[in-house]
Amino acid sequence: MSDAPISKETKNKLIEYRNSIDNIDAAVINMLAERFKITQKVGKYKAKHNLPPADKKRERLQIERLRKLSEDAQLDPNFSEKFLDFIIEEVIHHHEKIRSDE
């Protein structure tokens, strides 16, 4: 890497890209918050009806669906699967807590 000064145009372009990333990150967080509001309702519903916190068939179908969406969007399906696995683990943890609190 060079220690040469960065041009104003280069700095501005980098700021533009970073602002776009920041906006996308904010949207992702808001979408995750909405998703977790719904999964909390699912957890309460499952607890009320004595259903198990995890649904392996649903999880498998969701992973298959997300992998297909990832491929269509030219995003690494393995990354998407890891991301969904993390979310599913967190949702199940919340459902187990809701069940134990009922």
Image (cartoon, rainbow, N blue to C red):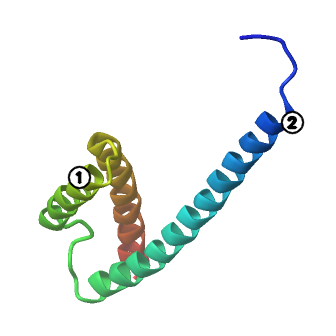
Judged by depth in the image, the label closer to the viewer, 2 or 1, is: 2
Relative vertical location of residue 39 with respect to residue 89 in this rendering, above or below:
below
Give residue 8's mark. 2
Residue at mark 1:
67
Tell me which residue sits at (87%, 20%) in the image: 5
In which quadrant will I find the C terminus? bottom left
Check disc 1 and report its element: helix, strand or loop: helix
Query: For residue 66, which quarter of the picture?
Result: bottom left
Relative vertical location of residue 88 with respect to residue 75 in this rendering, above or below:
below
Give residue 39's mark. none
Left or right, 21 with respect to 38, comes to right
- Mark 2 near mark 1, Cβ–Cβ under 8 Å? no
* Disc on the earlier residue, 2 or 1: 2
In which quadrant will I find the N terminus? top right
Q: Amino acid at mark 2?
A: Lys
Q: Amino acid at mark 1?
A: Arg
Q: Residue furthest top?
A: 2
Check disc 2 and report its element: helix, strand or loop: helix
Query: For residue 29, which quarter of the picture?
Result: bottom right
Residue 81: x and y in percent read 29, 48
